[in-house]
Image (cartoon, rainbow, N blue to C red):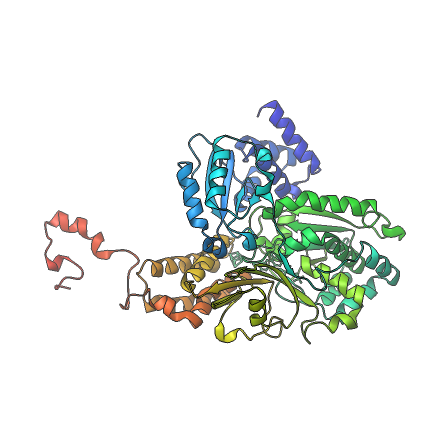
Amino acid sequence: MATDDLCLLEQIVARHDNDASKLLQILREVQECFGYIAPAVVSSLATTLAIPRARIESVASFYSFLHLTPHGEYRVLFSDNITDRMLGSQDLMAQMCQQLWLQPGKVSEDGLVSIGTTSCTGMCDQGPALLVNGRAITRLTHQRVMEIGQLIRNRTPLADWPADFFRIENNVRRSDLVLGSTLLPGVVLRIAQVLGGQHVIDTVKASGLRGRGGAGFPTGLKWEGCRNAEGAEHYVVCNADEGEPGTFKDRVLLNLQPDLVFEGMTLCALAVGAKKGFLYLRGEYRFLLEPLQAVLLRRRDDNLLGKNILGFHGFDFDIEIHLGAGAYICGEESALIESLEGKRGVPRNRPPFPVTHGYLQQPTAVDNVETFCQAVLALHIGAAKYRAIGTEKSSGTKLISVSGDCPRPGIYEYPFGVSVREVLQDCGAVNTRAVQISGPAGVCLGESEFGRKLGFEDLPTAGAFMVFDDSRDMFEVARNFVHFFAHESCGFCTPCRVGTSILKQTMDKIAAGHGTRYDLIEVENLDRVLQTTSHCGLGRSACNPVLHTLKHFRPAYENKLKSLDFEPAFDLDGALARARQMTGRDDAGAHLKGEGI
Ligand SMILES: Cc1cc2nc3c(=O)[nH]c(=O)nc-3n(C[C@H](O)[C@H](O)[C@H](O)COP(=O)(O)O)c2cc1C
Ligand code: SF4
């Protein structure tokens, strides 16, 4: 390696205390600095961190934003969520490929650029979107794509691209308890400190607050379990991985209410007895890193973080931000912890749960961004008032990320119990054929179910609300979701690794006009296998998109099926052409569909 590069590398490693458990952060910075992780860099890191090269390569190859080979000076990734596609992302990508004389997935011969796709970038309310060297650009049009192509051709440094390209909107359409909060930093923390950690837990338990990351586990119980678990250290982790396609409310919360997030984490630390917290920020939200770090700095200056917080002797707590690198599975809490420890993001066996054996095998409370905000407000207004909002089993409000076929996509905050129809009315959707609740892993509703209500009693949701009008082919929607699962399966367990791939091939086969009823029955069989044998929630929910769309929109599948009982995925008769040629036969009997068969 050149001396200058070696110097840069040493600086990166030193910034992370020469600590191998920070490997992912080191590799991410190396990638940002050098464009890829070269073999010489791997060797140098192996020596400095005293770990095998194989470990570095195995971690680097797990994350889709890290590359062990050159991927171009400009790495362009089009967001491939169904809502981006509905807004024309595929045409725009084809346009850029044509302009730059490049095939998708390839690096240009001069090493200038590569163009490909990535899973949902969390910009569904302002798509189509892309990432260039990890930075998001939204509201793509043919004009904007042409300008981007020109900037790349001219090798214009990203810092000199029009600032407007990188503007990310919040699009808040309806505010309530959380988005409307004007609480000053430290107000709730000061009172909580006086009343003590047990009071925080009791209030959160009494408020009925349940986790907003999807599963809805009672937050107070989790914090209590963590407080009571034995361990030399306790940790707090904020899950800001937000990878579920169609979900972007955590991005908006981190942008508009970062103090609520950090205050919630600090209250949790008081409750569980933690001195250290992590915010795991998805790589796609890289643009939030510096603003969030500035908020942390300010909170340290105001003695809301650090030693003896607010003068309370012995209450020490600080927060570090870790960036992900393009792996949806790292949203699963145990995979996230593995990733925090600098490893591949493979989910752990559970039990034991993170609450007793989390980060570095110590008791760890992992909560969603929104959960921390809600906890602050539950403590602020009091358990009884908080419980009075929403429904019996779902107290408080919920942020919904609305995207798809509606004139007003964006963030809507409602008390739990709002009906799907009410949300559709508010976002101006008309002629709605279907709504996908909680992303591909969630449920697809047809019109007859629009009276159903968001909440743990009926429709639990992490927040995604994707609208499809009557012009949409719901088979294609399900196919996009199935491709997502196949791409994001971490590959650890065979049923999911193979099953998601078979599912993808089946949907592609149907799309190509070779499907039969037999394939649909096979999907049901596959679902049974995945439900019972998958290691984590990704595998267990992989067949949902097909099963749910089949339930409501069976004709969308049947229109594409052949009426035969069995149809091979390739042209069998065509495959015999060479044999016919060699034997000099081309009569009807030499064809599979000929009379002799
Ligand atoms: C495949 C998969 C992906 C997940 N992604 C996220 C995510 O992006 N954000 C999140 O908060 N929870 C996600 N979860 C849920 C977490 O595992 C965990 O339940 C959650 O962070 C707990 O926080 P809460 O109690 O505040 O909801 C995911 C779960 C699975 C199985
Ligand atoms: S179910 Fe899929 S994503 Fe989950 S551990 Fe197994 S292979 Fe990985």
Quick check: 277 left or right of 44? right
Q: Position of residue 108 (x, y in %)?
A: 43, 34
The x, y position of residue 201, in whole percent, is 78, 65
**Residue 447, percent from left and from top:** 48, 73
One can see residue 105 in this view? no
Q: Give the mark count.
A: 0
Q: Is residue 388 visible from the viewing direction of this image? A: yes
Quarter of the N terminus within the rendering: top right
Residue 98 to residue 124: above or below: above
Q: Position of residue 282 (x, y in %)?
A: 61, 49
> Which of the two residues, 21 or 466, is positioned nearer the viewer here?
466
Residue at the image point whose x is 12% and y is 60% from the top: 589
Q: Nearer the viewer, residue 46 or 277?
A: 277
Q: Is residue 315 left or right of residue 166?
A: right
**Quadrant assignment, res 271:** bottom right
Please, which residue is most extreme toward the top here?
A: 3
Above or below, 36 relative to 504 = above
Residue at image location 87% in from the left, 49% down from the top: 308
Relative height, residue 71 to residue 214 (above, below): above
Q: Quadrant of the C terminus?
A: bottom left
The residue at 60%/45% (across/down) is 167
In the displayed structure, does residue 552 sit left or right of residue 123?
left
